[in-house]
Amino acid sequence: LHPIFTEKDIVFKEELLGNWNFEKNKVRITSLAKEKNIELPGKIAAIKDKGYLIDNGDAADGRYLAFLARIGNHLYFDYYPLLSEVQEKADEFFMGHLIRRHSVYRVTIKSKDSFELNQLDGEFLENLIKQNKVRIRHEKDSDGNIIITAPTEELQQYIIKYGDEPGAYQSDSQVYTKANINL
């Protein structure tokens, strides 16, 4: 539920800006500071110049706020979904039942024309919790899914401890290459 970063952890890498290919998908990463039509909450608005807008071009599943943070030895993207125009117009009662959550990806910049994302593996963390090998604040929803409720400091401790552990990440990394066309 909480971001993995504090303001001091944020870094901005210009080389991530642009149009990117991932398999058959196209993604555009722009500076959040240049976006005029996005209303941001107070705390995020204050650090807008250090953020990214990630747009996969699909209105249904489409746009994310992202902040790049250095935590331990690695860079991480903290993704947070933006509401689509349709979602923003949805009934307030309905929207009150949805909880937007942060997604975390380790970022490895390979070159000026490529970077790799590795998402933290929720199953790895869930197994650590079940085996009492890690204490991190969490809740279970009515379906038995674990929702991490830990504050930023606890999340960072977990990331630092397991940041170099290959099993802490999903096995399928996503390699993005620079696209030569505009989206």
Image (cartoon, helix red, strand yellow):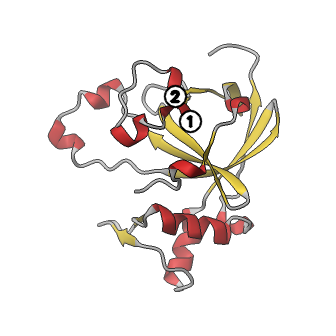
Q: Residue at x 65, y 72 (%)?
A: 161
| Image x and y of residue 96, in percent | 21, 46
Residue to which mark 2 is pinned: 32
Residue 146 falls in which quadrant of the image?
Answer: bottom left
Give the percent coordinates (x, y) of residue 155.
52, 65
The image position of residue 84, as x and y in percent, is 37, 28
Q: Which residue is mark 1?
A: 50
Q: Nearer the viewer, residue 104 or 71?
A: 71
Q: Residue 51: x and y, percent?
A: 54, 35
Q: Which residue is the extreme one toward the right?
A: 111
Q: Quadrant of residue 1?
A: bottom left
Left or right placement of residue 132 versus residue 68 in this view = left
Q: Is residue 22 left or right of residue 120?
A: right
- Residue placed at 65% from the left, 67% from the top? 160
Secondary structure at badge 2 equals helix
Q: Residues within 10 Å of mark 2 (few under 14, many from 20)?
A: many
Q: Which mark is nearer the camera, 1 or 2?
A: 1
Front in this rendered view, residue 81 or 50 = 50
